[in-house]
Amino acid sequence: MAIPKDYKIKNIVPSIITYLNLLCGFASILLSINGYYTLAVISLILSAIFDFLDGRSARYLDAITPIGEQLDSLADIVSFGISPLVLIFAKFSSLNFLLISTCILYLFAGTFRLARYNISEKSTYFHGVPITIAGLMLAFTVFFNHIITAITALILAYIMLENRIIIKKR
């Protein structure tokens, strides 16, 4: 496979950081399954740091690419969509209807939010709470109980999709 003429090595840096986000999200899943809940949350915090840095590095290096934007969203759905849910179900080990249904709503809302963001015109504001913030908030609920987690998942699903919530990008 030939390397495109307009390809620059600087385009790889943001993608490597995105892959570190994805790796930490996957590590969180593995840690959750094995009962290391606090380490799983720490791994998600690292994912969020890498998610912040990949965008910053892409803008700083003038290396924003369509593939990089897609990679970022795919990593985010693993790290901040799937991973917190695995953590929740591993921690509470109870598959009750309330927890399952609110977590499914959270997953659908987060996925929809990322898809909507990918096709929207770029702006200096987020409409709705980003899945990175929502995923971290949801992950921290494992230190409480499954009722608080279910209620939080429902609220986060709503505020990820709420267009009237506007957050300035940094």
Image (cartoon, rainbow, N blue to C red):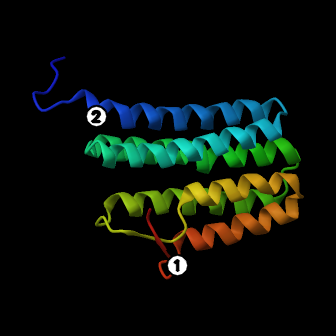
At mark 1, the secondary structure is loop
Q: Please, what is the three-letter code of the amino acid marked with disc 1?
A: Ile
Secondary structure, mark 2, is helix
Which of 40/101 is in front? Answer: 40
Q: Residues within 10 Å of mark 2 (few under 14, many from 20)?
A: some
Quarter that holds the C terminus: bottom left
* Residue located farthest toward the front when viewing the structure as drawn: 60
Q: Residue at x 57, y 31 (%)?
A: 23
Who's the residue at 69% across and 48% down the image? 84
Q: Please state which of the two labelled residues, at mark 1 or mark 2, is closer to the viewer.
A: 2
Vertical side of 86 occupied by 124: above or below: below
Question: How far apart, in angstroms, are the residues tagged by discs 1 and 2?
Answer: 32 Å
Q: Which residue is mark 1?
A: 165
What residue is pinned by disc 2? Answer: 11
**The residue under label 2 is which amino acid type?**
Asn
Q: Which quarter of the picture shows residue 67?
A: top left
Q: Quadrant of residue 83?
A: top right
Vertical position of residue 89 compared to residue 138: above or below = above
- In the rendered image of this protein, does residue 129 appear above or below residue 42? below
For marks 1 and 2, the one nearer the N-term is 2
